[in-house]
Image (cartoon, coloured by chain):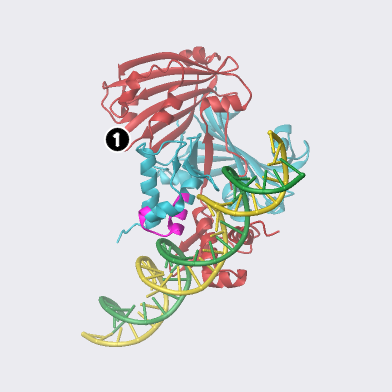
Chain colours: A cyan, B red, C yellow, D green
DNA sequence: CGCGACATTTTGTATAGTCATAAAACGTCT
DNA sequence: AGACGTTTTATGACTATACAAAATGTCGCG
């Protein structure tokens, strides 16, 4: 029943040989044809296993030279960044959303640069608060480029946050995330209901379309309580 | 030019249909056979395109039901966490390493829990500083489980940091990362040469083997200057 | 000796055909 | 009508084969 697919068995087997140290970084491993023979399967099956392992960064493949065990590079760490409401509801807490500010405004220097526009160009500025069990959980400070997303001007964002709306209505192709730490300014402290000087964890996101920059947003979290964590067993 | 592989063209084409809104989340898309016909290729080629798009989370596939466009879930964000020395040297700065402390010590409560051992069990405790151009860049506070990695007791870690050594000598299978923000305590402030109360970005990592927990480590970075960022164009 | 043309090797991709598997739809029997 | 087994259908996986592309090594010519 839970018969594993052959290509999976091969992947696991090869991974094992690396994890046990039988094959070490830099080692050349047998060619596809030879492996196919030892595993008693077609080359295509071995190929798939090797291809996927290479995609995961475990192996490095070059034509003619063959396949070798990759030197461990930096870990690439897969963080899950779910929609806030999902994240909060997953913990069993009650989610609440409040729009604090909405208006077309000239872009200050920093967001302008982030959106690749000139300082002073008009853009939609949104500030929202997300609550978990009536306590501030995340402060969202967002700019949306009306040139790329003209529909945003007709949205009030009173009821639903910009994130779900954007995710649903504006497909994007590229994103960049930046994570940093800061301390709460007076304004941020008041908004998040924490003492001035407390740590704040900041996630900044910029997204692009084929048409250009879509939005740039900074999420502020109370740093003492908030953590970003990878799911266990990410391989 | 047909320099791109057909399965890639198909992937891009399908992605486009989604990004342009032709196909929207929840929509069913044509079956493999039908797509194969419209693209003028074999079913296997379409299959590969669909499989990879499903792996990327763009599509959802169920037998008999067919393939449909996935509702955008949380983004999973791939952070690169390179070895410190690579990270520093990549910026052109000079890298320097200093071992501050090394000793077999009874585990305090927190690291003990992280390593899944009893408080008071002996483990190897290391504290190191990594410099970029003579300025403190990262403070590393690490515990290594000697039960899983007995060789660690013979390593001085005077010259090379524990990270490269572990990466090279102790294969691991699972890792968990946690990112959080804090403010500099007196001790951390002195070590990192920043004012007390400044923000600190903390990355914590736990890694496992088939034999059990390997190591747990906390990296402290000056938060005003340090950023974690995703590589651009991660799709 | 230098260097370009060519052959070889190994991975990459495509194809058709087969079998497996899951789930929905259908039909039959009670 | 409802329960249960059968058929249908779409995806999932594997095999075998063929050819393409890339990198390397080699041969031969000037």
Q: Decide which of B198, A210 is in the foreground and name it.
A: A210
Which residue is labeled 1 in the image?
B211
Q: Is residue A161 visible?
A: no
Is D22 placed above or below B125 here?
A: below
**In the rendering, at what x and y percent does residue D11 appear?**
46, 65
Left or right of B227 on screen, residue B217: left
Label 1, residues with CA under 10 Å away: few <14, some 14-19, many ≥20: few
Q: Decide which of A226, A127 is in the foreground and name it.
A: A226
Q: Decide which of D7, A154 is in the foreground and name it.
A: D7
Identify the image quadrant of the N terminus of chain B. Answer: bottom right
**In the rendering, at what x and y percent does residue A94 appear?**
44, 44
**In the rendering, at what x and y percent does residue A220 appear?**
56, 34
Left or right of B7 on screen, residue B99: left
- Identify the magenta region: A38-50
Q: Main secondary structure of the magenta part?
A: helix
**In the rendering, at what x and y percent does residue A160 appear?**
57, 50
Q: Residue D16 occupies which quadrant of the picture? A: bottom left
Secondary structure found at label 1: loop
Left or right of A59 on screen, residue B150: left
Q: Residue A18 occupies which quadrant of the picture? A: top left
Is A153 placed above or below B102 here?
A: below
* Residue at figure coordinates x 30%, y 25% from the top left: B150
Q: Is residue B138 visible?
A: yes
- Give yes or no for residue A180 being in the magenta stretch: no
Q: Decide which of B29, B231 is in the foreground and name it.
A: B231
* Residue at figure coordinates x 52%, y 56% from the top left: B52
Q: Residue A33 occupies which quadrant of the picture? A: bottom left
- Tag 1 subunit: B
Is A164 placed above or below B39 here?
A: above
* Badge count: 1
């Amino acid at each position: 029943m839970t018969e594993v697919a052959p290509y999976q068995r091969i992947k696991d087997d090869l991974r094992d040989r690396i994890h046990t140290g039988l094959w070490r970084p830099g080692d050349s491993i047998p060619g596809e044809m030879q492996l196919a023979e030892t595993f008693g399967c077609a080359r295509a099956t071995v190929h798939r296993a090797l291809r996927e392992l290479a995609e995961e960064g475990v192996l490095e493949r070059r034509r003619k030279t063959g396949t070798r065990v990759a030197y461990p590079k930096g870990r690439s760490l897969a963080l899950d960044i779910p929609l806030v409401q999902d994240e909060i509801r997953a913990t069993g807490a009650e989610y609440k959303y409040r729009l604090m500010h909405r208006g077309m405004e000239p872009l200050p220097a920093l967001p302008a640069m982030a959106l690749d526009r000139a300082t002073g160009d008009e853009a939609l500025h949104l500030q929202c608060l997300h609550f978990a069990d009536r306590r501030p959980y995340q402060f969202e400070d967002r700019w949306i480029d009306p040139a790329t997303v003209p529909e945003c001007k007709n949205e009030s964002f009173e009821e639903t946050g910009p994130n779900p709306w954007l995710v649903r209505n504006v497909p994007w192709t590229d994103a960049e995330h930046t994570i940093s730490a800061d301390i709460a300014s007076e304004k941020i402290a008041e908004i998040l209901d924490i003492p001035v000087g407390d740590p704040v964890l900041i996630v900044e996101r910029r997204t692009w379309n084929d048409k250009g920059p879509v939005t740039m947003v900074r999420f502020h979290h109370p740093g003492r309580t908030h953590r970003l964590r990878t799911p266990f067993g990410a391989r």
